[in-house]
């Protein structure tokens, strides 16, 4: 028998670990990097008009405006206005805009004339907008095509709401048809009852003014609840989505932003585009 030497252990052969193949991971990172760069270049080119305007490359851009720190929404606003150049542009206001200096309300971005305005007149069955009278007269003095709208509350009596609007608003020749603003769903009634109440409001207002009212609502609300049963009415649609830059053919008006600035108005204001030019807009106003 061979004698073992004390304290000596057999040698262990260590295997050198194999290097992982990271080529696929690096390829994916490169692909994502290139894709991101392409996206940035595309967006920069696509929104070149708005970007150029707000970076001060246009001749009609003043230094004070350049220093204001415009937001991404402002760039989109310019892009949308350029895409819809030739169509009539307007705003809508309520007491939330505070005191408006109507003589200064003239253009958007110094080049798009504000040709019409919708003024909130009433809310629900019992509230008149606190600035309606002032805004209604001010818009007329500023020689703008004006229209009045009612904010509809689904859980309140529709006939009482119609009576309040009729009592408050006197439409004249050259004014736009009355508008009902429908944004919320009912809490204590069915959708069918909501539609029934809305029809009653529309019928009462049409009977008084002898003109079919316009319905204002969001695009999703329109698609889900109103598109089929109210297809004989004209719609003013709100859609602020960044990707949308042109209005659909079946929209009469498109409210494309709630974050615009207009001379004479402090803070943000909604901007709308009519699906036609000024002459076509005048064609839908009241004749008597």
Image (cartoon, grey):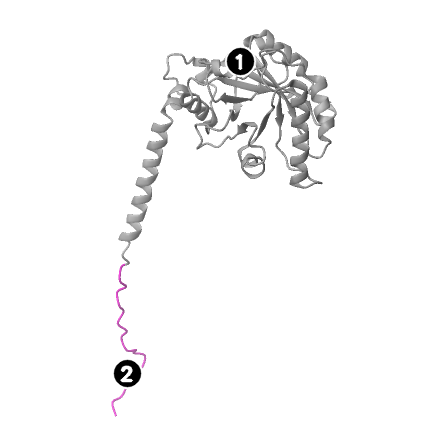
2 displayed left or right of 95: left
**Is label 1 in a helix, a strand or a loop?**
loop
Image x and y of residue 112, in percent: 46, 15
**Stretch of the chain drawn in magenta:** 1-19
Category of crowding for the residue at label 1, using alpha-carbon neighbours closer than 10 angstroms: few (below 14), some (14–19), many (at least 20): some
Q: Quadrant of the C terminus?
A: top right
Question: Can you identify the residue that label 2 sits on?
Answer: 5
Q: Quadrant of residue 67?
A: top left
Image x and y of residue 181, in percent: 62, 27
Predominant secondary structure, magenta span? loop
The magenta stretch spans residue 270: no
Q: Nearer the viewer, residue 251 or 84?
A: 251
Q: Quadrant of residue 158?
A: top right
**Residue shown at the point (72%, 32%) measured from the top left:** 156
Q: Nearer the viewer, mark 1 or mark 2?
A: 1
138 displayed left or right of 247: right
**Label 1 close to label 2 by CB (< 8 Å):** no
């Amino acid at each position: 028998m061979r004698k073992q030497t004390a304290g000596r252990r057999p040698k262990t052969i260590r295997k050198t670990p194999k290097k992982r193949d990271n080529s696929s991971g690096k390829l994916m990172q490169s692909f994502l990097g290139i894709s991101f760069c392409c996206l940035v270049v595309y967006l920069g080119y696509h929104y070149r008009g708005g970007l150029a305007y707000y970076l001060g490359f246009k001749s009609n851009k003043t230094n004070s405006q350049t220093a204001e720190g415009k937001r991404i929404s402002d760039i989109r606003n310019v892009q949308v206005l350029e895409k819809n150049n030739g169509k009539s542009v307007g705003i809508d206001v309520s007491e939330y805009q505070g005191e408006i200096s109507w003589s200064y309300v003239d253009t958007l971005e110094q080049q798009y004339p504000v040709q019409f305005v919708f003024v909130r007149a009433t809310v629900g069955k019992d509230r008149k907008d606190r600035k309606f009278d002032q805004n209604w007269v001010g818009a007329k003095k500023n020689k703008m095509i004006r229209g009045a709208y009612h904010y509809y509350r689904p859980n309140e009596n529709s006939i009482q709401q119609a009576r309040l609007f009729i009592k408050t608003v006197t439409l004249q020749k050259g004014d736009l048809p009355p508008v009902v603003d429908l944004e919320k769903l009912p809490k204590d009634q069915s959708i069918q009852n909501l539609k029934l109440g809305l029809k009653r409001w529309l019928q009462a207002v049409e009977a008084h003014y002898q003109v079919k009212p316009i319905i204002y609502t969001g695009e999703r609300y329109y698609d889900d609840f109103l598109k089929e049963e109210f297809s004989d009415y004209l719609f003013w649609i709100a859609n602020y989505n960044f990707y949308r830059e042109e209005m659909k053919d079946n929209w009469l008006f498109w409210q494309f932003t709630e974050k615009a600035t207009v001379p004479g108005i402090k803070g943000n204001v909604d901007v709308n585009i009519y699906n036609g030019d000024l002459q076509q807009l005048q064609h839908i106003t009241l004749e008597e």
